[in-house]
Amino acid sequence: MESWMQTNLNAWKLLYDRYHKNEFYVLAHTIDGYRKSLFQTTIDRYKTDEKFYSLGRFRSADEVARSIFGLDMVYSGEGVLSIVEAPSFWQKHIHRKPGYSWKCYCGSEDEKTRRQILRFKPYLFCINAAANSSLDDKILMREFYDKLFPNPSSFELS
């Protein structure tokens, strides 16, 4: 089984043991907007759980912390779950309403992702590094970010 899915199944098992809920969600981290205090609450809940603190390769089947953070907040009722459906082919390419903006978009460091973000103007987006991303891809992405966000966020280090 793919390690990403196994990670999510392992996280769900921990959550089921704690909350006994049968819902199984897989979060898109483009919508992980939570207060710092909720992260600390989650850390406190799992501080004695060895599985939560296992040090595996990022996104390996043994690494569950990333999934637990978002999902525990939802299962505990302290976070808000928003299920975002992807637009259909018809909505994307044929009958796109003027001014329409996607809620979120996920892609890789490639030209298609840059085009889609400019075209659909998502409210939130996530760009993942691809295993085959080259230095040129990373430079193009940096230029893309600088063009989209010419002014640094107040959260960025100077």
Image (cartoon, rainbow, N blue to C red):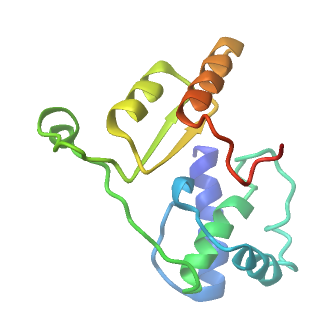
113 sits to left or right of 11:
left
Q: Is residue 132 in view?
A: no
Rendered location of residue 91, percent (x, y): 18, 43
Tell me the quarter of the picture where residue 133 sits: top right
The residue that appears at 60% across and 18% down in the rendered structure is 140
Rendered location of residue 102, percent (x, y): 34, 48
- Relative to the observer, which residue lies in front, 156 or 18? 156
The residue that appears at 49% across and 77% down in the rendered structure is 80
Q: Is residue 122 in view?
A: yes
The residue that appears at 80% across and 76% down in the rendered structure is 43
- For this orientation, the residue located farthest to the left is 95
60 sits to left or right of 123:
right
Marker count (numbered) = 0
Q: Quadrant of the C terminus?
A: top right
- For this orientation, the residue located farthest to the front is 151
Q: Taking 108 as reference, is 82 above or below it?
A: below
The residue that appears at 40% across and 45% down in the rendered structure is 122
- Relative to the observer, which residue lies in front, 58 or 129? 129
Q: Taking 143 as reference, is 70 above or below it?
A: below
Rendered location of residue 17, percent (x, y): 65, 83
Q: Taking 156 as reference, is 136 above or below it?
A: above
123 sits to left or right of 92:
right
Q: Taking 135 as reference, is 90 above or below it?
A: below
